[in-house]
Image (tube, rainbow, N blue to C red):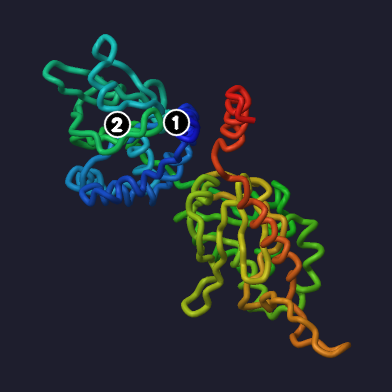
Amino acid sequence: MQTFPAVLLLLSLLLLLLPPPSAAHNITRILAKHPEFSTFNHYLTLTHLAAEINRRETITVCAVDNAAMSDLISKQLPLFTIHNVLSLHVFADYFGSKKLHQITKGSTLTATLFQATGKADGTSGYVNITDLKGGKVEFGAEENDGQPRATYVKSIDEMPYNISVIQISRILTSSEAEAPTPGPTLNVTSLMSKQGCKSFAALIISSGAEDTFTENLDGGLTVFCPSDAVLAAFMPKYKNLTAAGKQSLVLYHGVPVYQSMQTLKSSNGLMNTLATDGASKFDFTVQDDGEDVTLKTKVTTATITGIVVDQEPLIVYKIDKVLLPAELFKPAAAPVAKGKKGEEGAEAPGPDASDADAADQTASDNGSGKLYGSGLVSAVLGLWLVGSGLL
């Protein structure tokens, strides 16, 4: 009668010994829980620093409240300059509350994302952290000899040793970070042509969609590019579209925000595109299938096969199929059983119906075998039962 409780005890111990799966952080969601940091949070997204923070494995974010952010906004700096100033508030190391109050020798220099951009000269991309008496901790840009300084206020959220989000009293000032910064001079179609997306870049130009892609670049742009070989096979269908349809199809492959791979994996669900316009949804579903990320329309499913360009605020992914919107192509119909010999009870399925079926099967296959550590548990349990003479 003691065997079953013993087995449960052994299983419990084994599960406790297994390392927990790592959890990705999302700075936007963390700060969204605290309205007093809404302005800081907004500018992290606007400058694309949020995406950079989210894809880093070890990071510290020094947030300031809305009142402190007003001092920065009142300077009316260009957005790219604000990016540099805020990147000075993101450390490439983990500093939780405990570590801040246990700094060796009382002071340390830490590198920031401003230093990582390569725009910072000398020590201008470093921040000096000083642990003072009475539990007070101060922060100052090293190039200004630490003056004026911001002070530690409180810990907002900590995930040791992944991300620490803390509040400091004021914006860190730096003449180097606040220097005028020109915006990026990116040419979407030129970059794509040079990186293996020549055919799709040509379609962007010929369809009249280039201006829309360019206009959305400053605010962030994600492009999904079918390979040249995939487009070559698709061109007969493309040529049958109207001029408006061709432009909508091309715009359907663009998303008006910078989406890193980590962001795509953590934001499964419907995604609007450059073709989305009121009643015309022109959206697709992003789905994280294990190691793969798929883009699923009502007509077909494409898989991201690689990154072609990643230069914020632009990122271009290569995909293995053309994205077909239901607004332009007939959705795949479910197979219907035949009636009398030679008769069918439904119309022929739309384009790429077989692709949709295959994608559904793949998704079903990927859904199995996800019990964390089950193989190890089964093996050890088997050995225990054998050793106990129960098998």
Toward the viewer: 199 or 10?
Answer: 10
Residue bearing the label numbered 2: 174
* Disc 2 element: loop
* Any part of residue 89 in sight: no
Q: Going 31% across and 16% down the picture, which residue do you hit?
A: 108
Q: Which label sits on residue 116?
A: none
Q: Going 66% across and 76% down the picture, which residue do you hit?
A: 331
Q: Going 48% across and 39% down the picture, which residue do you hit?
A: 55
Question: Which numbered disc flags the more N-terminal residue, 1 or 2?
Answer: 1
Q: Amino acid at mark 2?
A: Ser
Q: Residues within 10 Å of mark 2 (few under 14, many from 20)?
A: many
Label 1 and label 2: CA atoms lie apart by: 58 Å
Q: Amino acid at mark 1?
A: Leu
Residue bearing the label numbered 1: 9
* Any part of residue 321 in sight: yes
The percent position of residue 65, horizontal first and vertical second, equals 21, 44
Front position among marks 1 and 2: 1
